[in-house]
Image (cartoon, grey):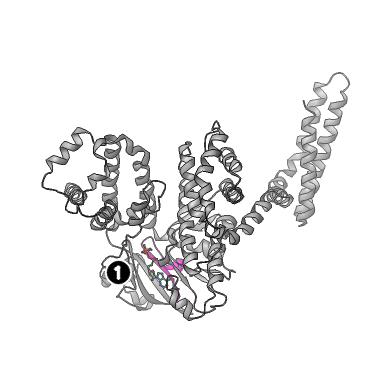
Amino acid sequence: MAVARLYQITRTLLHYGLDDLIPDKKQPWYGKLARKSLFWLKNQHKDKPLGLRLRLALQTLGPVWIKFGQMLSTRRDLLPHDIALELAQLQDKVQPFCGKQAQQLIEQALHINDISELFSEFDQTPLASASIAQVHTARLHTETDSKEVVIKVIRPNIAQQIEADLALMARFASILVKIVSQSRRLRPIEVVKEYKKTLLDELDLLREGANALQLRRNFIDSDSLYIPKIYSDYSRKNVLVMERIYGIPVSDTDALLAQGTNMKLLAERGVEVFFTQVFRDSFFHADMHPGNIFVSPHTPHNPKYIGIDCGIVGTLNKEDKRYLAENFIAFFNRDYRQVAQLHVDSGWVPADTCVEEFEFAIRTVCEPIFNKPLAEISFGHVLVNLFNTARRFNMEVQPQLVLLQKTLLYVEGLGRQLYPQLDLWQTAKPFLEHWVKEQVGPWSVLKQVYANLPFWAEKMPELPDLLYQTLKQNNRKVTAPAPKSNTKQMLLGMLACSTTITSCLLYLANDAMAASLTMLVSIGLFIAAWRKTG
Ligand SMILES: Nc1ncnc2c1ncn2[C@@H]1O[C@H](COP(=O)(O)OP(=O)(O)OP(=O)(O)O)[C@@H](O)[C@H]1O
């Protein structure tokens, strides 16, 4: 089976002349020999450009390879521009599987004899069918209610097919690295590994459900984004039941205009929603292609997005966020020295990187971007350029940032398609500046102290004992009269302990503000006492 599939893949790749991806000079003699010995598998599409041939070959090979091509298309850092553009056109529209079978899969997953036990209606004709899952409409009836829902079902046996193809793909990647040492720069083994993780994650609808619940909670009071309800009680690894939404596809600009949608506001809200997800929540929908975004038909003057398919999400830690925000701000202020310094400070490029050289390289790549009016500059391309430059200075690939960059490119494309004059920088700048200020201002220190108060409240009962032990030890050590600094240290320590206790009592009495301020004083006293130790 595996051998047959291997032959099928090799035949397809050679029929589309994809051996051309490896320049003749770089092919070792045994590679050339192997190619020649498969003389009946000729390139049958010589007239077509390489990018197109690659796209057609992936399309022929099926869903796993199509999705792989789609993922590669977002890796502008790895691929030439024309090939990336070609791969971006890959569509994974595939034949639906039988609706009766979908019904059986749902019945098995939910342990029911007949779908009518839970759903008063179920349409066997799918609403949509993609490579991994298929979506059916239904009506969920509970004791109190009846709700229109959609049921997403994973294709039968797809997991085995995916595993088998991924294993072959990994084998191809390791052969490629062995025979063409230059291909290491493209990191094929890591790329396939990353892809495997993404794809296997997509097979687990409980994961998708949990992501949707989290996003929904984050935006529950929002005017800008709605995430449909998930019915977790009726969801399993291969079945997801969620509220059915009726929205206008975001790509249907004519329909949006016809209902009088405020396009400027809609475009700006796209940017706002993205930055809120990234900076406020550290949790962003990372599969924002137009097929997953709709616009509510109800309030065109106060337009609201509806997001579905939360299978892929990204997260960023605090340092990444701060690094990103400060980089954007420094970049738009054309402060390349600061951009370079930030890369070093964040540890993304080695500490011994020559900042001047790095600054110069960034300037060379980024300065031409400013030939355009500020409003037309793409954040996504800024990141692509920055990462490409940083990679020359040994920056490691950061998967979470690659995901972010890809999403940013989608968000920008979408925004400009809705409202071509959209000024991304003006929309995002106040948001970023406000966020950075919040992170470093006195409020942020107070917030951090507040966050640690429960810890101190828990430790409070131990403090008098600790203080007593320290004093006793000091007394034992000191045979001669205590030097002045020791006495001062003890006094400061006692004061610090009592302010900590006061702070914890205030916290327990629900006066958070006073508790935080007192804790700040006590931290100061502890530091002062500690400095006296030396
Ligand atoms: N809650 C919903 N209400 C109405 N329609 C929905 C809902 N969820 C999904 N759909 C429809 O089903 C289609 C496919 O759904 P979804 O994107 O979740 O599946 P998918 O298998 O992950 O597809 P793809 O891989 O192409 O993104 C959507 O484009 C939309 O038309």
- The residue nearer to you, when weighing 274 against 88, is 88
Q: Position of residue 422 (x, y in %)?
A: 54, 65
Left-right relation of 251 to 445: left
Q: Which residues are magenta?
A: 228-248
Q: Position of residue 493 (x, y in %)?
A: 81, 35
Disc 1 designates what residue?
Answer: 102
Q: Tag count in the figure?
A: 1
Q: Quadrant of ligand 1?
A: bottom left
- The quarter holding residue 102 reads bottom left
Residue type at tag 1: Ala
The residue tagged with tag 1: helix, strand or loop? helix
Q: Is residue 336 above or below residue 136?
A: above
Query: Can residue 204 be seen from the camera position used here?
Result: yes
- The residue nearer to you, when weighing 119 against 186, is 186
Q: Position of residue 79 (x, y in %)?
A: 37, 48
Q: Residue furthest top?
A: 480
- The residue nearer to you, when weighing 40 against 150, is 40
- The quarter holding residue 39 reads top left
Q: Is residue 235 magenta?
A: yes
